[in-house]
Amino acid sequence: QDIRPSAHTAAPVPLTLPGQRPSRRPLISYVLPVYNEQDGITAFHTELTAALAQRPELDYELVYVNDGSADGSLGILKDLAKNDERVRVVDFARNFGHQIAITAGLDIAEGDAVIVMDTDLQDPPRVSLELVDAWREGAEIVHARRRTRQDSAFKRATASLYYRVLRSCAEVDIPLDTGDFRLIDRRVADELRKYRERSRFVRGIIASMGFTQTEVKFDRDERFAGETKYPLKKMAKLAIDGMTSFSTVPLKMITRLGFAVLALSLLGILYALGMKFFRPDITVSGWTMLMCVVLFLGGTQMLSLGVLGTYIGRIYSEAQGRPLYLVREVTGGRPQDERGDT
Ligand code: UDP
Ligand code: MG
């Protein structure tokens, strides 16, 4: 008997899976937020493309997001795009902030892997290739973790403290000493688009997604030109966004405080009543009533705030509208093309 598959049933071996790009070279997308970087952006672009030229086995696209720069950054970026079709420029109508700029870039990046990095040369372009290597070894999320950094002592100290506090409060494992410099696999990038919360802390969202995560350590350089675009006010907003997006500890503290205050106030009331009945000689008229009312109101109010807070916390997490779960893969069952439905 001829057991060779007949020409009719043997399916041609597809070169690529459906949905995969036909090119053999993996496409790496870079998402590059730019805010008033006119003095450094050319140097950054040159260094990045030089690093990528060392790796001809990689195809790449550069997505610059101009976050409402008030200087000449946009003109420089447009020139870069004119001379190289691998460069795309998204121009925001105003300054929407770093986290939103990253989000816009992630929304349009098409690569098999997407790298987010700063455009001030603090995140060295050659390190992005180390992220790619870790990805090719199987990681789906690669965080670039700062071994050392060249920022002001104040920034280093506050950031270091912040990440440690955040880690102890947050419900997810947010890696220490990492900014937004990281690589994510296409699958992760697709899932990330489902997160549409407004006050966003992208590094926390990515850390909370699961998948196979690893880290690459690097030494963070000094800013090539200009000054930090994160003044204290923006940094504080980011810090609060990070804390409130991933932790309900502040809310829980109100509830705990409520219980403690109520318990103490009950003791206080007992004391006031005791004084009234056992030492009426030294109890001023009206004092007992006053104490009871003040303590009772204080205690119940604090507890009620905690209860309200708990419900607000639930409304907040509904409003964030995060996906309920993320699936990496569904295995088994009949193949798609054999299913009966038409
Ligand atoms: N950035 C941005 N929008 C902003 C602030 C910053 O797109 O409102 C960009 C900026 O151009 C840089 C990156 O975000 O590429 C990080 O900013 P910066 O280097 O000033 O922050 P730092 O490294 O001092 O924390
Ligand atoms: Mg910087």
Image (cartoon, rainbow, N blue to C red):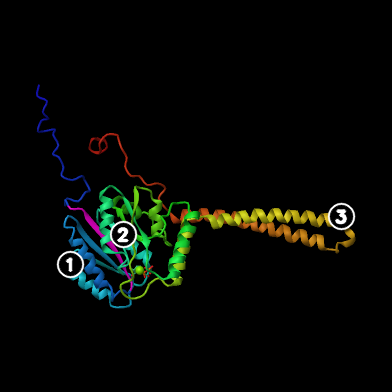
Which quadrant of the figure has residue 278?
A: bottom right
C-alpha distance separating marks 2 and 3: 71 Å
> Which residue matches tag 1?
84
The structure residue drawn at horizontal position 44% and vertical position 64%, both measured from the top left corner, is 159
Query: How many discs mark residues in the rendered view?
Result: 3
Q: Is residue 47 above or below residue 303?
A: below
**What is the number of the mark on residue 279?**
none
Quadrant hosting residue 194: bottom left
User: Residue, x 37% and y 68% (percent of image)?
Assistant: 150
Asked whether residue 244 appears in the rendered view, the answer is: no
Picture layout, residue 12 above or below residue 55? above
- Toward the viewer: 329 or 217? 217
Residue corresponding to mark 3 = 277
Q: Are marks 3 and 1 in contact (CB under 8 Å)?
A: no
If you read the primary sequence from the N terminus, does the residue marked by circle 2 or circle 3 appear first? 2
Q: Determine the CA span between mark 2 and mark 1.
A: 20 Å
The magenta-colored residue range is 25-35
Residue drawn at x 55%, y 58% as measured from the top left: 250
Amino acid tagged 1: Asp
Name which of mark 2 and mark 1 comes first in the sequence: 1
From the image, tell me which residue sits under label 2. Answer: 106
- Amino acid under label 3? Phe
Q: Can you tell me whether the CB of the residue at mark 1 lies under 8 Å from the nearest atom of ligand 1? A: no
Determine whether, in the image, residue 172 is placed left or right of residue 8: right
Residue type at mark 2 is: Leu
Per the image, label 3 sits on a secondary structure element best described as helix
Image quarter where ligand 2 lies: bottom left
Q: Position of residue 280 (x, y in %)?
A: 88, 59
Please say whether residue 199 is one of the residues in the magenta stretch. no
